[in-house]
Image (cartoon, helix red, strand yellow):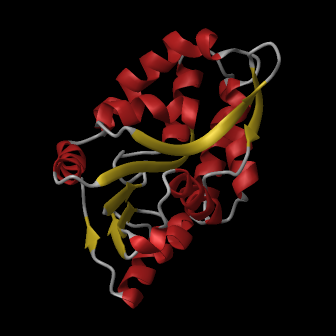
Amino acid sequence: MRLTLFDLDHTLLDGDSDQLWCDFLMDRGVLPREPFETLNRDMARDYAAGAVSAQAFCDFYIGTLAGRSPDDWQALRRDYIDTRVVPRIGAAAQELVARHRDAGDLVLLTTATCRFLSELTAVHLGISQLIATDCETGPDGRFTGRSLGILNMREGKVQRLRDWLARQQLELVELESTLYSDSINDLPLLSAVKRAVVVNPDERLAAEAAQRGWPVISLR
């Protein structure tokens, strides 16, 4: 069986889902531009450099959901996907996903972005399987602003994938696995699959790819 994994942000999506969400909420007046504009910019910079903890990164963006239920966010989430995400997914990215899907691969989207923000993107891409960071909700059904379970980031992506495969009665070592990713944050998962493909890489991942002989492609 062929397993094909796709990272989302800066790989299939020309941009970062969480950063775009924060910008969207500021533009809609849901978040105050100060201090969130500076915090959002600094978090994006530190994430790209691999200099922020997984917990701090996820908590910052999941925190923007706090105090409302999924139903409360539904209209804004749909607006965000339609206006900020879909226009940033190019034809080359969609064609690559379709090629693997049509070849009969088990295709999976794996992203540090929370499930609530990424699940509609997976639907748009035609990817039925999604592993994402999960959000906690309270007894009242509202988001608490905290993550739930293992974060789907860095080493967590490897653990979450192994756990997901175990539920399908599969093991990663038995599969012809490929991962497409742009980020040094995905180095643990890129190292765990049989075939790593680097997409529009950041500087550190480009150097790693050159050293390891990983192919580098562009979807822009």
Rendered position, 55 above or below 202: above
On the image, the x and y values in percent for residue 144 come to 79, 26
On the image, the x and y values in percent for residue 72 come to 62, 9
**Visible in this render: residue 178?**
yes
**Visible in this render: residue 38?**
no
On the image, the x and y values in percent for residue 19 come to 54, 40
Residue located farthest toward the right when viewing the structure as drawn: 139
Rendered position, 185 above or below 108: below
The residue located at (30%, 37%) in the rendering is 125
Q: Nearer the viewer, residue 170 or 202?
A: 170
161 relative position to 64: left or right: left
Residue located farthest toward the bottom when viewing the structure as drawn: 211
Rendered position, 121 above or below 209: above
The residue located at (47%, 61%) in the rendering is 170
Give the position of the N terminus as an image quadrant: bottom left
Q: Quadrant of residue 63?
A: top right
